[in-house]
Image: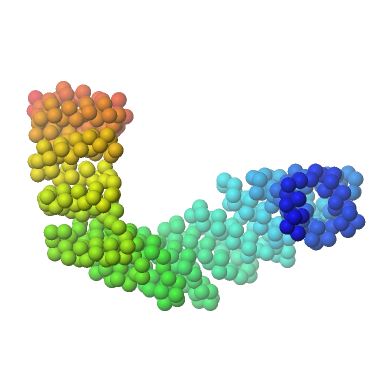
Amino acid sequence: MIVRRKQWRSHPMDFKSLNSMVRIFGGGVPDLRTDWVIACCFRHNVDLGLAMIGDSMKKKGLELRNNVIFFNSLIDGLCRSDRVDDALKLFERMPKLGSLPNSHTWVALIRGLCCKKDGSHFALQLLHDGIQFSRDRCDVSAACNVVLEDLGKRGSWEPALNLFQVMIEWGVVPDYTTYYFLVKCCCRAGQVDVGLELFNHMVETNYAPNRGMMTALIHALIANNRLAEARHHYDRMIELKLFPTVFTSNTLIRGFCHTGETDSAMELYRSMPKPNLVTYNTLIDHLCKYEGGVGGEKVFEVMSILDEMMGNGHTPNAITYNVLIHEYCRKGMMGSALSMFKSIKFNGIKPTVYTYNILIHGYLKLNLAENAKLVFHYMVDLGFEVPPNAVTYTLFIDFYSKKRLFDEATRYWNLMTINGVQPSSVTYTCLIHGYCSAGFVHEALTLFHGMIYEGGLQPDRAIVSALIKAHRRR
């Protein structure tokens, strides 16, 4: 059997040889197995199948009456080849050729229409025709689910609910797949209450939810800051032994951190069987930024999480170090920040441009410009392994503009241009504000025009106000 399949694939047949083969098997009327083999061929070579239809109509050499498998394979092949219009024409001709469509015909056509841009409207129309006129030979539930899946991907929740209502009116019993696509569609469209209502209706009809559906529901609730309800469904998943993924747990922890519910975040973290690096980084970032972190009352908790991270085999990455360095710099603990930076290199982790920018900003905030320059030159001395970006240059330009040291500010502006880094709107704003505060209106206006015509950037109201004030002071 394996050898025959290899021979069939390696020697593709033309129309004449296949037609002869069909006559050999069953004297011109193929049996079900022969139909299946031929259908597999037509699905990948629809032109051959269409040629057989033409030959049958001319010579009556191949009987096509009541051979719905033959037509279904052609329609499916045409849809898969993005020839949906041809598939619709063949579908309309089926009764004249002696075969009536069945559930597979409708599903193949509807799936093909759903793949087309703006095809959902025609798929719905075809589906409504199938429900109204062909209920005896159309597996309506399967066809509806195909349309609901496509509407869900597009976030078209209102047409999806209308279709669901039509199913109920015509006595089509929704199955689990129907509810799954509906709930996901509503969640994706931000209609969480509608999704919850459908979810509860599904549970009442004795369909057990699965992990995918509950995950979609939890993520939608988190996105709408309904964390208590999200936690309720999260706990419900565990009760049903539909254990949440670490991604879902991390999303809920991030939601708690965002709303300042540190205790809830820590409680959820402690209940997780296997936290990952994202879990640890999220908690460390939150504890550092909003709970005192390093150098504050939560320092022991931060260090405890770090120890647990490494104890569970997770090596801190650049994100972990960036969070800690940023916190040290924010508190003015530059010695600790520099030590943490050195440990990055020691542990074989490549610092990011964000790491360098944090250090530079920390030094400039303390008026330690020479230290900031050393960090910048370290970036350059590495052969631009980590090249400075617009933020790096802007930090220096802003610092020197506020000090009215425009020679230094211009030097970094020129370095920026030489190294092919495009100034951002923030870069322009810093220098323009500096010129205006020093009374250099001509230079500010020149830079203002350069921002619009060379940089292609739109100035904000603050820049315009600064220019007007500078003009009035002249």
| Residue 414, horizontal then vertical, whole percent | 22, 26
Location of residue 290 by image quarter: bottom left
> What residue sits 60% from the left and 64% below the top?
166
The image quarter in which residue 295 lies: bottom left
Answer yes or no: is residue 133 visible: no
Can residue 249 be spotted in the picture? yes
Q: Position of residue 177 (x, y in %)?
A: 56, 66
Colour theme: rainbow
Quadrant containing the N terminus is bottom right
Q: Indicate the position of residue 209 as horizontal and vertical percent values.
A: 49, 71
Q: Quadrant of the C terminus?
A: top left
Q: Nearer the viewer, residue 100 or 358?
A: 358
Name the residue rendered at 19%, 30% in the picture: 412
Q: Residue at x 44, y 60 (%)?
A: 187
Residue plotted at (63% across, 65% down): 141
Question: Going by the image, does 98 lie left or right of 440?
Answer: right
Instruction: Give left or right: position of 244 versus 47.
Output: left
Spot occupied by residue 125 in the image (x, y as percentages of width and height):
63, 54
326 vs 472, left or right, is right
